[in-house]
Image: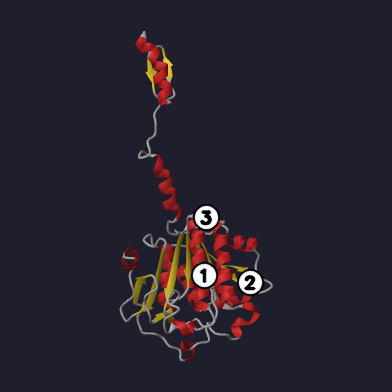
Amino acid sequence: MMRNSLLPILLIALQLPLCCTGFAFQLPKIQLPWEGGTTSTSSSTSNKKSPIKSNDKVVIFGATGGVGQLVTKKLSARDGKNYQLRIAARDAARAKETLGNDNIDVVELNLVGDSKATDAELQAAIEGATGVVVSVGTTAFPTKRWDGGNNPKAIDMEAVTRIANAASNVESVRRMVLLTSVGVSRTKQMPFLILNLFGVLDAKRAGEDAVKSAAGEAGFSYSIVRPGRLVGGPYTNLDLANLFKIEGGAENGVDVAGGDVLLGDCKRDACAEAVVQCLENKSCVDLEFSLVSNEDTALTNDGWSSAFTSM
């Protein structure tokens, strides 16, 4: 009798629900923290950062720029991928003419100035995409390209921040790639001290921070690509590499290093391949790296994987 009278007290103390049938007692299955309960969360997080796959939609901001054109062409030409490409451009007709591809969806919107797109319009442009590429920018020093408010602060900081925030509100986004520049964390050193006289590197660094913050909140993977001075066609900037049509070597070999540590030239085609690898390569998750060209042969997919894994 004493033993039976203690049973309710023991059950209350243990705070375990009890199912009884006659004198047979059955405790329900309790899922322990190290059992299957964490698998779905881990899998969900992994899937949220997974590479883009065949037939996925990719949105490209800055597709009419030198690197942006090459990124668009590379994604279009990927064998068997059939990516659905959407271009966000302030002049749809010019974008279609420049890219020469009628299969690309072009959304007309402006990122700067009085007619800049609303947050809702930016989000609508990204809706349904799994990959987002941001390859926008302007000249480091005041030129005609600054007309209409297209200065470093407006495009590299404010516009990039708004794109990142818009992407964080789109559930389908898994990967976001931002193209910036070497020197963003070395603004007190030459030659970056000169390059940053009008704040272009500070603005780019602020844009990077915004992308990383949005990725952290939304759970998608970010990649920050920091190339050296861009050389080789297509030429779109008003700089010496354009003036003298500097090609930068016959091969697309590259040196890749985590952080902001390299200095040198980077071929636009090699830079574009890095951007595409950031979208497609499973080893590229939440990385920021610098990139300069060398005279070696281009990296294979496995070579890129090794480079990403080593960071």
Q: Compared to 219, does 199 lie above or below?
A: below
Q: Is residue 153 left or right of residue 305?
A: right
Helix, strand or loop under label 3 = loop
Question: Which residue has dot 1 on it?
Answer: 206
Amino acid at the residue labelled 3? Ser
**Residue at horizontal 43 percent and vertical 46 percent from the top:** 41
**Residue in the foreground of this view, choosing between 185 and 65:** 185
**Is tag 3's residue or tag 2's residue first in the polypeptide sequence?**
2
Determine crowd level at label 2: few under 14, some 14-19, many 20+ residues with C-alpha closer than 10 A. some
Q: Position of residue 78 (x, y in %)?
A: 43, 67
Amino acid at the residue labelled 1? Ala
Question: Is residue 231 at least partly visible in the picture?
Answer: no
Q: Position of residue 28 (x, y in %)?
A: 41, 26
Q: Is residue 208 left or right of residue 148?
A: left
Q: Compared to 262, does 239 lie above or below?
A: below
Q: Position of residue 195 (x, y in %)?
A: 48, 83
**Is tag 2's residue or tag 1's residue first in the polypeptide sequence?**
2
Helix, strand or loop under label 1 = helix
Cα gap from disc 2 to disc 1, whole angstroms: 20 Å
**Residue in the foreground of this view, choosing between 129 and 115:** 115
Tell which tag, 1 or 3, sits nearer the viewer: 1
Cα gap from disc 3 to disc 2, whole angstroms: 23 Å
**Please, which colouring scheme is shown?**
secondary structure
Question: Which residue has dot 2 on it?
Answer: 110
Q: Position of residue 298 (x, y in %)?
A: 34, 75
Q: Are marks 2 and 1 in contact (CB under 8 Å)?
A: no
Q: Which mark is residue 158?
A: none
Quadrant of the drawing holding the N terminus: top left
**Is tag 1's residue or tag 3's residue first in the polypeptide sequence?**
3
Toward the right, the furthest residue is 114
Question: Which residue has dot 3 on it?
Answer: 172
Tell which tag, 2 or 1, sits nearer the viewer: 1
